[in-house]
Image (tube, helix red, strand yellow):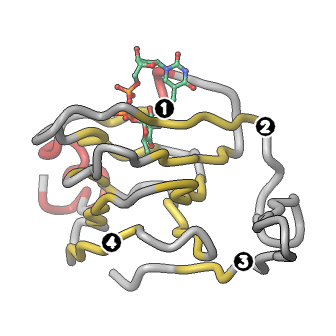
Amino acid sequence: MIPIWIDLQVRGDDRGSLVALETGRQIPFPIRRVYYIFGTKPGVVRGLHAHRKLRQMTFVAQGSCDMLLDDGRNRVSVRLDDQARGLMLDRMVWHEMSNFSPDCVLVVVAETEYDAADYIRNYQEFLRHVHPSHS
Ligand code: T46
């Protein structure tokens, strides 16, 4: 499981900084939805699912958090703490977000509208999808 990072161009001047996200440039899929997670309480773990079809990219607009990625073969934990870097959240990757700083604003751009049926929330079920011959 090798995390896919995207480096973003920060357009800074003496007023501050700006990062733009555009389909076909920084984002390798059409953006149909944007959401952000903030005010996460200490010790909380979010995510704990994989998506069947959905591809997403995540960014921290502020603060930091950890993201565990698991493709059913390997798992890796990375830290999101740089506003100039995005992390790909591919389909069929189990992911868990934790260790949120109190000021963390985690921005997610997604390829489709919200669809609860796209979530696999049971880890054993996720493994059965990844390794169908083992079930
Ligand atoms: C993901 C990770 C990174 C909606 O109504 N619309 C939406 O677009 C989303 C994303 C969520 N919701 C509702 C569903 C739940 O009642 O908001 C509530 C919290 O969602 P959830 O528990 O799924 O949040 P996380 O932080 O566990 O996961 C979210 C995304 O749902 C998920 O797709 O990949 O962030």
Q: N-terminal of the two: label 4 or label 2?
A: 2
* Label 3 CB sits under 8 Å from any ligand 1 atom: no
Of tags 4 and 1, which is closer to the observer?
Answer: 4
Task: Tell me the SS state at disc 3.
Answer: loop
> Separation of disc 4 and disc 3 at Cα?
16 Å
Q: Which residue is mark 2?
A: 32
Q: In the rendering, at what x and y percent does residue 46 appear? A: 26, 39
Q: Which residue is mark 4?
A: 79
Quarter of image, res 123: top left
In the rendering, which numbered label is found on residue 118? 1
Q: Quadrant of the N terminus?
A: bottom left
Q: Are marks 4 and 2 in contact (CB under 8 Å)?
A: no
Q: In the rendering, at what x and y percent does residue 129 appear? A: 30, 51
Q: Would you place residue 85 above or below residue 94 in this image?
A: below
Q: N-terminal of the two: label 3 or label 1?
A: 3
Q: Which residue is mark 3?
A: 8
> Separation of disc 3 and disc 2 at Cα?
20 Å
Q: Can you tell me which quadrant of the image ligand 1 is in? A: top left
> Separation of disc 2 and disc 1 at Cα?
15 Å
Q: Which residue is found at the position 27% from the left and 50% from the top?
A: 100
Q: Which residue is found at the position 32% from the left and 72% from the top?
A: 79
54 or 103: nearer the viewer: 103
| Callout 4 amino acid | Arg
Q: N-terminal of the two: label 4 or label 1?
A: 4
